[in-house]
Amino acid sequence: METSKTITKAANIIPRLRLGAKTDHGVVANGPHRVKFIKDKETKGKDFQGKEIDMVAYLVEENGESKSYRIPKFNKEGEVNYLVIRLAEVNEGDEVILEMKKKGIKNYVEVSPVNQTSKVEIEDDDIPIIGEDEPTDSTTEKVEDKVEDSEE
């Protein structure tokens, strides 16, 4: 569907990040998504009944492609949505894994930070050799035997 992609790109329409797909049996998760958070903003949207609600829109990048991810700002009880609270811990530019999970009959989104690891060069002399300083005779076995005897 390259023509459709070209049209939406020219119209500055950003595709949505979809963590699940609707089926006849409810929403089914489609696996983990590694995304980089670019920015967020408050916006308006509509709930399932068509009522206008406050939302938070996130601009993320997945596999080099910009995507939009929107969630309600408040839950049904009028409290700040748990996901808004969790994503407040994420800084712009951070990468996380977002994955829809099932808890009972409800779905939720798990947020797992991607650990930023750096390469460290270690020379052979810095790597300890296990057992290098241990005696090579049967002294070790005798100590273990004494420990076992004292436990009885």
Image: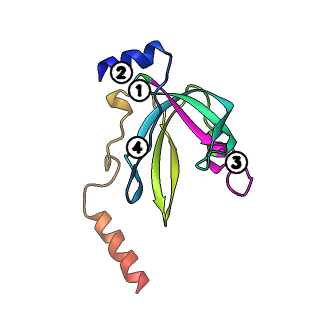
Badge 3 crowding class, 10 Å Cα cut-off, few under 14, some 14 to 19, many 20 or more, is: some
Indicate the amino acid at tag 1: Lys
| Left or right placement of residue 105 versus residue 54 in this view | left
Badge 2 crowding class, 10 Å Cα cut-off, few under 14, some 14 to 19, many 20 or more, is: few
Q: Which residue is mark 2?
A: 4
Q: Is residue 134 above or below residue 73?
A: below
Q: Residue furthest front?
A: 50
Is tag 1's residue or tag 4's residue first in the polypeptide sequence?
4
Between 145 and 39, the one lying in front of the other is 39
| Mark carried by residue 74 | 3
Between 123 and 100, the one lying in front of the other is 100
x and y percentages locating residue 52 in the rendered image: 69, 41
Q: Is residue 56 above or below residue 21?
A: above
**Mark 3–mark 1 distance (CA, rounded to whole Å):** 41 Å
Q: Residue furthest top?
A: 10
| Mark carried by residue 119 | 1
* Front: mark 2 or 4: 2
